[in-house]
Image (cartoon, helix red, strand yellow):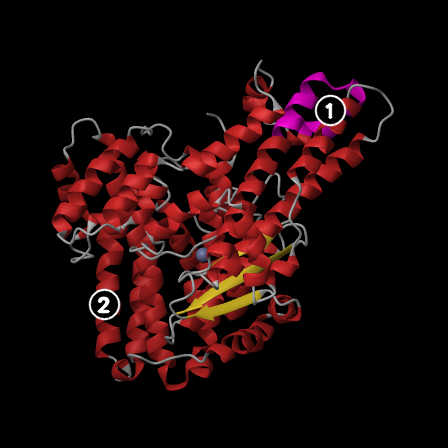
Amino acid sequence: MELKKLAALAAAAVMPLSLISCTFGYQSDRDKKEASNNASLRQEARTADTSGILDRYENIDIDKLNSDIEKFLDDVHSSGNDVQADIDGLLDTLAKSYNAKTFSEIAYYMDFGSDALEAEADGCTEEASVAYEAISYAFHVAYQSAYPEYVDLIRPYIDDDWLDYYNSPGVTLERIEKNTRQAFASGDSDLDEYYDVAYGSETDEDKLDLEAAKIYLQILEGYDTETFYDDFSRDYTPEEIMPVCEMVRSELVPVSQHGLDAVMDHPSYEDLIGADFPGDELLPTLQKYAERLSPQIGEAAKRLSDKDLCFITEGRNSYNGSFTATLPADGDSVIYIYRDELVTDMIGIIHEFGHFYASYYDDTSAYDQTNCLDVAEIQSQGMELLFLQFYDEIFGDNGSIMRLYKLNDILDYAISGCLMAEFEYKVLENRDSLTPEEVVECYHEIMDDYYPDSHFYYVSHIFEQPGYYISYGVSALAALDIISDCYDDRDRALEKYEKIAHVKAFSPDCSFKAALSDCGLSDVLTEDYIKGLAATVDGLISREEG
Ligand SMILES: [Zn+2]
């Protein structure tokens, strides 16, 4: 089964990291598959939606899309037709389908127990996938047989690697829709098996590690060392990254230990435990200090409330992650924040606001959107670092300990990203000879010094998207390029941040090293940089210790 972009679509929401990212229960995932075709449940969704979010989009009509595609394919076969209008219409439908996916998901996440809202969210996600695959088919078929006058209009939407497939006998619009719906309904059996293990009734964690390791080896059968990073439009290879991971381990882990000690020994440490940041102050606080950074950043923060684009939720009935998602039909984005009811919620909203702000400089169309996480996470983490200058005002007496917390947190992104990347690659290199026991041993060898009590089976991300973790590592290294300026030369920090915020992270042409070099930022994958960074951050920690 070939589908051009199902996986990319699923990854479109930008999620922050925690090493232990088991946030989705398996039960809900399994329900999803049964519910996806449940039209009557979807009808109930409008009544079930007390938030009014479902009124903010229109569902797309797949039959109407199919007839638009047929008209387009007819139009390209004769002269003098308004083919540009056909193309615009198809792209508009796709953008609308992405809006529907984003809003329906948020409505569901805010009422996570609702079967009707779940069915609606799954239905919208499936429709967005069907729309993308069908429109992609239409462009590739049209391009192959179009009148010469239309070829240049269609060319921007063509991926040469897919021309043969879409134009092969037996590949029809009907078949594309059927395949997409089937892929959506059947999910991924290795991943299902993993969720069964991770969320099952077994409580012996060593046993769970071994079971998960068996599945992990199965999953890795679909990968090889040559192409491991290919799905993430990266311009560096695993061979290049492994020495970087070694340096991060030797240089940054001791700094992180220093940071952790500084937090624990801080006079405000006791005050911080259990401290909350009131939910209704998150957005006003963000706006107040965003304005002080620059008029543009202030304007973006104001849009969050002016256009009602920030959803803040809490409690057991909500999905407990935070993310930013695009609304391509409006040229907007939305932020979803789950409150842990801790003081760190304020940092969470600043992080998502970094993604939100950068998305306004990114006009990549829904059809072309991928997600260069390596760069997107610099945009969000960089915003977090810019806000360090306001911590004494935002957190009062806890300003200094919160800065220490943040320094530690961003080091943790760098370190956990690199350690996990090292683990993933080591296992992949020796995939054919390793036993499940050895996989688990390898995990503990790499992780135990830094995460002494963690278990291999916790880390759902490496099962869901192998090769993904290093994005957290490299992006944190790059964001930290502005850290000393955030303390001592704030204008320069802002200037550097603005450059990276203007990079289009949704563009298929975006890649990490090229973006850094275009923005005049450091080449962060070098020994000199990492050693310098370790000294800088260590110095800042000492400064906070006073
Ligand atoms: Zn993020």
Q: Disc 2 residue type? A: His
Q: Is residue 253 visible?
A: yes
Magenta stretch, main secondary structure class: helix
Secondary structure state at the residue bearing disc 2: helix
Q: Which residues are magenta?
A: 136-155
Above-or-below relation of 87 to 54: above
Q: Residue furthest right?
A: 80
Secondary structure state at the residue bearing disc 1: helix
Above-or-below relation of 377 to 132: below
Q: Are marks 1 and 2 in contact (CB under 8 Å)?
A: no
Answer left or right for 291 relative to 314. right
Answer left or right for 55 relative to 515. right
Q: Disc 1 residue type? A: Leu
Residue 321: x and y, percent? 41, 60
Q: Quadrant of residue 300?
A: bottom right
For label 2, the residue is: 258
Q: Which quadrant, please, contains the C terminus? A: bottom left
Answer left or right for 56 relative to 500. right
At a point 47% along the width and 65% down the height, the residue shown is 337
Residue situated in front as seen by the camera: 199 or 251:
199
Residue situated in front as seen by the camera: 295 or 536:
295
Residue 73 is labelled as 1
Residue 314, magenta (yes or no): no
Residue situated in front as seen by the camera: 18 or 93:
93
